Amino acid sequence: MRIMNEKKSDLTEVLVHLQIESQQQDIPAADQFEQWAAAALLKYRGRAELTIRIVDEEEGSELNEQYRKKSGPTNVLSFPFEAPETPDDIGQDWLGDLVICAPVVNREATEQAKQLFSHWAHLVVHGVLHLLGFDHIDEAEASEMELYEIEILKGLGISNPYEEKVG
């Protein structure tokens, strides 16, 4: 998918390999995942390729325990690609993999009174920023990452996901 940035003449080309291994309903379409990933990459990469795997809680829990040593599923896991040291361009555009747990995303959207697909978009943007090296381990990094997320989502017509819902 190609998305033109209206502010610049930059072109972002993103190839998303979508793997749906979830029985959950209301999973966005492949083109939506591509649009959200491209929006997150617009300022940082001209080309990128990544896999987004949509899973249920069982696989999400297994991966979270294996890689983060935390029990239970989480909403999104990111696995940045680490290119081998090689003289050629193997993997130059490969960004990495995202694993998104559909039941957790849907539950969070309901609990937080967020529009479902807006929450999906936020988690794709969040995950892609992790693949680019952003993190939220300390408060300064978290603030920076949140600002980028808010800006990217605003460009997609999605409101600030960190604003508290009133009422």
Image: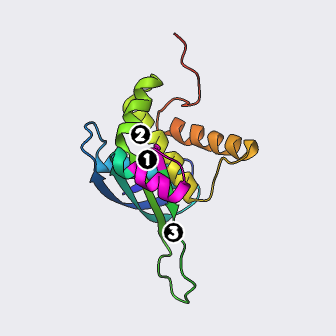
Crowdedness of circle 1 by 10 Å Cα count: few (<14), some, many (20+)? many
Q: What stretch of residues is rendered in magenta?
A: 60-76
**Residue 14 picture location, percent across and down:** 42, 60
Between 155 and 28, which is closer to the camera in this rendering?
Answer: 28
What amino acid type should be assigned to the residue bearing mark 2?
Answer: Trp
Residue 2's place in the image compared with 26, above or below, is below
| Spatial separation of the CA atoms under disc 3 and disc 1 | 19 Å
Which residue corresponds to mark 1? 36
Residue 81's tag is 3
Residue 68 is covered by the magenta coloring: yes
Q: Secondary structure at mark 2?
A: helix
Dots 1, 2 in contact, CB < 8 A? yes
Note whether residue 59 is visible: yes
Crowdedness of circle 3 by 10 Å Cα count: few (<14), some, many (20+)? some
Between 77 and 127, which is closer to the camera in this rendering?
Answer: 77
What amino acid type should be assigned to the residue bearing mark 1?
Answer: Trp
Which residue corresponds to mark 2? 120
